[in-house]
């Protein structure tokens, strides 16, 4: 009964603190929506369309086929015959059709403006290579009589595609690699700001403890002979429940709310058991850290600065604010010390890598170990603070 009464007291104190509720629920929701929208055009599954110039000095059936094959490799892109704008240019030789069967073969010339990035250059180079290989294959098949030149263009293109297409089996080794580079805006933003919001539970935890000590409430509870384990548990359980509520609500926004804004909905693949395990692991880590910071702070101001500063630092190096896929190698290695990075990697393993419970087990183990270490240190310091609390204690 005492445990329930004390836990109820913590919940009532939190409900009467609108600033704490805003930090725990409104702030991560706004961050989630804003960042998902801001990154929607940057992190997407399909590459952006290109605008190109294809120069054909001597039109022929071969150059026409090459143009269609190239357009097939660059869906959504536009191929112009000429332009005054600084666009990538593909220049065919005047005798393009007559040299297709030459060995060695001299392909088209590619000219890039200075502002074209290396990824677009590589993509264009690959597309031209495949389209040219299909064109040369068709020329060989027509020369050998396998394909009639009188067939419609679409049929000849389909025959060339069939003979240059291979089924490639892809397997993802989930124990290594960076999945954030393959995540879309929704898959990266929702778990990142969900984790960030869950870790901010340390602020109301630490602030509430300081207020109880300064008001004398902690001393009254001590005079009642209350077991310290019960007191600690009464502070942990409500915030554990709040963390789990944050987890469910923010995932729900990702699944049902983002489509209302025209953004991709979050799908939740993988084992149904993996998500509750991950939620519990993150919640235990955040609440244990909150207990430690509550015991370390000597005033509400100290607790606020310490909790907020540590949270922002862990988020900055942990891939929450900046994806690890765009970090330098040294920063990506530094990110491995952040528990937020472990939680985000576990999320991406489920969402992007379609991982199983076994795949996220190492990340959950790290979070639980972090929770155990912070919890033991916090319990020790908390016990000392309570035992030393006196009527004249006002720090």
Image (cartoon, rainbow, N blue to C red):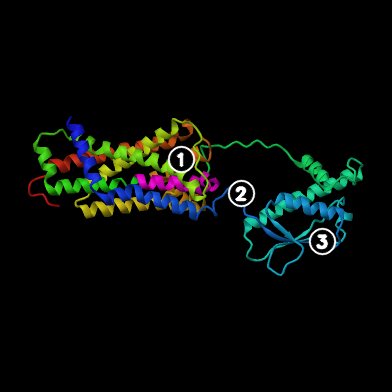
Determine contact: label 3, label 2, CB under 8 Å. no
Tell which of 219 and 190 is nearer to you.
190
Specify the farthest residue to the bottom: 84
Q: Crowding near pointer 2: few (<14 within 10 Å), some, many (20+)?
A: few
Which corner quadrant holds the N terminus? top left
Tell me, for residue 172, which label it has, or none: none
Q: Main secondary structure of the magenta part?
A: helix
Residue 347 disc label: 1
Q: Is residue 348 left or right of residue 111?
A: left
> Which stretch is magenta?
179-198
Please identify the quarter of the rendering in which residue 221 is found: top left
Q: Pointer 1: residues within 10 angstroms few (<14), some, or many (20+)?
A: many
Q: Residue at x 81, y 41 (%)?
A: 159
Q: What secondary structure is marked by label 2?
A: loop
The residue that disc 3 covers is 56
Measured from the top left, where is residue 46 in percent x and y? 61, 49
């Amino acid at each position: 009964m005492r445990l329930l009464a004390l836990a109820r007291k913590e919940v009532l104190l939190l409900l009467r603190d609108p600033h704490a509720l805003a930090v725990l629920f409104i702030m991560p929701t706004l961050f989630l929506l804003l960042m998902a929208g801001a990154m929607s055009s940057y992190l997407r599954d399909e590459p952006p369309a290109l605008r190109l110039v294809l120069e054909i000095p001597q039109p022929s059936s071969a150059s026409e086929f090459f143009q269609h094959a190239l357009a097939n490799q660059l869906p959504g892109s536009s191929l112009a015959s000429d332009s005054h704008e600084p666009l990538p240019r593909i220049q065919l030789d005047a005798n393009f059709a007559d040299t297709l069967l030459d060995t060695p073969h001299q392909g088209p010339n590619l000219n890039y403006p200075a502002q074209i990035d290396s990824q677009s250059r590589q993509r264009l180079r690959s597309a031209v290579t495949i389209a040219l290989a299909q064109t040369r294959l068709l020329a060989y098949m027509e020369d050998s009589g396998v394909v009639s030149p009188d067939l419609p263009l679409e049929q000849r293109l389909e025959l060339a595609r069939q003979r240059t297409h291979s089924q490639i089996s892809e397997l993802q080794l989930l124990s290594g690699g960076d999945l954030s580079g393959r995540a879309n805006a929704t898959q990266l933003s929702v778990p990142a700001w969900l984790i960030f919001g869950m870790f901010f539970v340390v602020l109301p935890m630490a602030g509430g403890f300081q207020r109880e000590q300064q008001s004398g409430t902690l001393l009254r509870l001590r005079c009642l002979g209350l077991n310290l384990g019960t007191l600690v548990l009464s502070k942990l359980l409500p915030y554990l429940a709040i963390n789990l509520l944050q987890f469910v609500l923010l995932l729900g926004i990702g699944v049902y709310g983002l489509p209302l804004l025209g953004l991709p909905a979050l799908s939740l693949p993988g084992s149904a058991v993996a998500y509750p395990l991950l939620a519990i692991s993150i919640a235990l880590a955040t609440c244990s850290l909150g207990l430690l910071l509550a015991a370390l702070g000597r005033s509400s101001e100290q607790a606020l600065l310490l909790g907020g500063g540590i949270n922002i630092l862990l988020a900055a190096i942990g891939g929450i604010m900046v994806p690890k896929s765009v970090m330098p190698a040294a920063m990506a290695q530094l990110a491995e010390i952040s528990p937020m990075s472990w939680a985000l990697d576990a999320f991406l393993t489920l969402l992007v890598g379609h991982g199983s419970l076994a795949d996220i087990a190492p990340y959950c183990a790290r979070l639980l170990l972090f929770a155990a270490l912070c919890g033991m240190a916090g319990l020790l310091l908390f016990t000392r603070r309570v035992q030393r609390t006196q009527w004249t204690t006002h720090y």
